[in-house]
Every structure is written in C-alpha cells, then in structure tokens.
Image: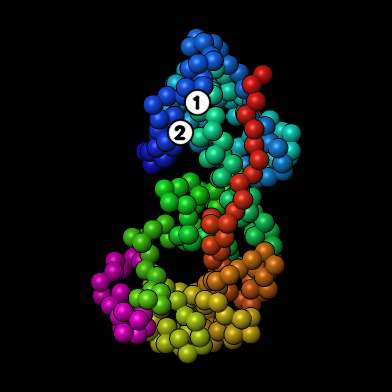
Amino acid sequence: MFEIDRIIRNALQEDIGLGDVTTQATIEAAAPGRAELVAKEDFVLSGIDVAARVFSLLDSQTAFEKLREDGFAVQRGEVLAWIKGSASVLLQGERVALNLLQRMSGVTTHTARFVKEIQGTGAVVVDTRKTTPGLRCLEKYAVRMGGGRNHRTSLYDGVLIKENHIAAAGGIATAVSRARLRAPHTLKVEVETTSLKEVEEALAAGADIIMLDNMDLDTLREAVVRIDGRALTEASGGVTLKTVRAIAQAGVDFISVGALTHSSPAVDISMLFK
C-alpha cells in the first residue's frame, strides 16, 4: 500500500500543484457531488481499488462503491463504480484516478489477449522490466489480472545474464560461474542466448533458464530439442499477437512480452457527474 500511495500522491501533486483554480473559481467549497465511472468500450478491468484510493487520499470521507472487481470483463456502457463526496474532491481526483485506471486496464486487456492466443499450448506469458517509470508495481499487478505472470520485478530479485553481461564478463561460462559464487543460492540463473552455439554454452555452464532471444521458429524448435528439459526455456524478442501462438507451439516454457507494459493502449473510461 505504501508504494501505491506514493505513486498516487506524486500524481496528485503533479496534477493539482498549488491548487485546482478552475474548481476553486466555479464550485462552492461545501457543494456535494455524485459521479459514476463508466466503461466507454469493452475491456478487462484492473485498478478499481487504486482509483478508489485516489479519492480517499484527497478526502477520507469520500464514498466509493465499486460495482466490478479487477479481472472482470466489462462491456461498453457498464457502470464500474459510484463516487459520492465533495464535488471539489471528485473533480480534483478525476484525472489521476482515470489515468491510472485506464492505464492498468489497458495492460490487463492486452495481456488477456496474449494469454488467450496461447491457450492449450502449455506455455506461459510473462512480462519484462519494460515498464512505465514509477508505475512498475501497478503494471505488473495489471499483467497478473490479465492472466499473465511476472518475470523478475527489478534487478534485485533474479539473475538474468544478458549479452552485455556476457561481453563484460568474458563469456557465458565465466558469467554463470561468477553468478553461482556471488549471487544468493535461492536465485535461479538465466542466460540470454541468440544462437544454438550459445545455447550449448549455457547448457554446459549449468544455466537454470535459457532465454532464446529473437530466434526464428526453426532455430527455436531446434533449441528446445537440444535443451531437452535440462533447463527451462524462455522465448523473447518482438513477440506479437500474430506470432505468439506459433512461438508457444515450438515448445518453450515461457514467452516474455515487453509489449504488455510498453505498448498497451489505455482503455476509455469516463467519470460523469449525476
């Protein structure tokens, strides 16, 4: 909750600043307000409690009645929540609440489409660290609401040896060996590979997970055959809704999709006074 409150407070400070001059000039301070949040298109909801928290941080007396839960598929025209309280508070919180709710629901909706595409294959869709700065915890939550799973949260909770680590360390074997010696024993070691030769090196080094980066389907299938269950496999790089099922059918365990968080369009939601 602390992290979410920090995000919301920063957003409110950014938006309100020294004061909402329009609301102060046009609305009586004691005027009551009642509004509804309405879906303007079909999508999968995420962030309804975050939206509620925006208004409660502005005024703890604000009443927020949610009518749908996160992960629920809503249709255009559905009312998602009712908000009742000071009209000034509702107006000041409107944009921040909508920005976060629309963004999170967009990520969840996009993730759900990827998850649907690979149903029945055994593969799992995961996210990446390609998130909006400052919003990572919200966007990764939104991925989970869409049926996806989280990759590592940040640099501290997983060893992922990528091409620049390999170059700086002097090779895959050296990088993995150092990771085994220096990283906590509870963390798995993942290695990024871009060729079958590198796959063999990662296997020989004892990698727990092998990332198969930007490989064509034939190379991807061959890599899975060579790995033969000795390590978990993760396909990565330029994955789209058009290509994700074929990638899953190549036999990989995970498919990481940066687009879940860096390219998901926000959904359309309105707050309307009644």
Secondary-structure class at tag 1: helix
- On the question of residue 171 being in view, the answer is yes
Label of residue 210 in the image: none
Secondary-structure class at tag 2: helix
Q: Quadrant of residue 78?
A: top right
Q: Which residue is mark 2?
A: 15
Q: Which residues are magenta?
A: 166-187
- The amino acid sitting under disc 1 is Gln
Mark 1 near mark 2, Cβ–Cβ under 8 Å?
yes
10 relative to 116 in the view: left or right: left
Q: Residue at x 65, y 25 (%)?
A: 272
Q: Quadrant of residue 75?
A: top right
- The x and y percentages for residue 242 are 70, 67
Q: Which residue is mark 1?
A: 92
Q: Residue at x 54, y 33 (%)?
A: 95
Does the magenta segment cover residue 208? no
Q: Main secondary structure of the magenta part?
A: helix
| 212 to 99, vertically: above or below | below
Name the one closer to the observer, 147 or 236.
Answer: 236
| 178 to 4, vertically: above or below | below
228 relative to 245 in the view: left or right: left
- The amino acid sitting under disc 2 is Asp
Outermost residue toward the left? 182
Name the one closer to the observer, 17 or 261.
Answer: 17
| 222 to 257, vertically: above or below | below
- On the question of residue 208 being in view, the answer is no
- The x and y percentages for residue 13 are 40, 33
Q: Residue at x 54, y 39 (%)?
A: 99
